[in-house]
Image (cartoon, rainbow, N blue to C red):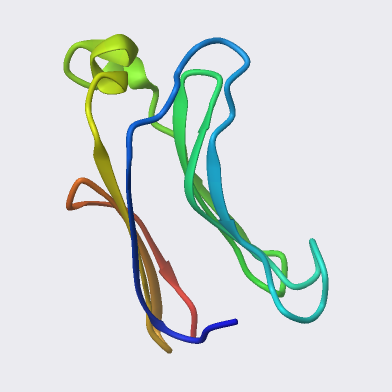
Amino acid sequence: SFLYGRFSLRAKINVHPGSWPAWWWLPDTGGWPQGGEIDMMEYYQNKVLFNVMDGYQRWTSIQPSLDTFPGGPQEFAKHFHTWTFDWSPEKIKLYLDGVLMNDYDVA
């Protein structure tokens, strides 16, 4: 259980068909989906996902295709990447390799 802070994951992920690596946050109370969900790192069907759903079930999802990254999926899979989740009373920010991918207003 935690409330606010910075959390980071450095990982090399499998991008083969059928692979679905993820690092999700689910609430302590309220259950899913009522309590919300934060997908700090998720890969699915050739996309990296940066999703936030709050307790009111407002949803924002950023889903860039790995085809848009230099060298495409196979080059992406060769390297370690850093996913970062910043959570404050005002914002949730999700980053990939230092690039802001999703900026969600909490308040």
User: Which residue is rendered at x = 33% and y = 32% of the image?
Assistant: 12
User: Which residue is rendered at x = 78% and y = 81% of the image?
Assistant: 29
Q: Position of residue 72 (x, y in %)?
A: 27, 12
Q: Position of residue 11 (x, y in %)?
A: 34, 40
User: Would residue 13 appear left or right of 70 to someone viewing this image?
Assistant: right
Q: Quadrant of residue 33?
A: bottom right
26 relative to 90, above or below: above
51 relative to 69, above or below: below
User: Which residue is rendered at x = 67% and y = 66% of the image?
Assistant: 26
User: Which residue is rendered at x = 49% and y = 79% of the image?
Assistant: 106
58 relative to 67, above or below: below
Q: Looking at the figure, which quarter contains the N terminus?
A: bottom right
Q: Give the total of numbered labels.
A: 0
User: Would residue 59 appear left or right of 95 to someone viewing this image?
Assistant: right
Q: Position of residue 17 (x, y in %)?
A: 56, 10
Residue nearest the observer in this picture, 47 or 5: 5
Residue nearest the observer in this picture, 59 or 51: 51
Residue nearest the observer in this picture, 102 or 40: 40
92 relative to 83, above or below: below
Q: Quadrant of residue 76?
A: top left
User: Would residue 9 appear left or right of 25 to someone viewing this image?
Assistant: left
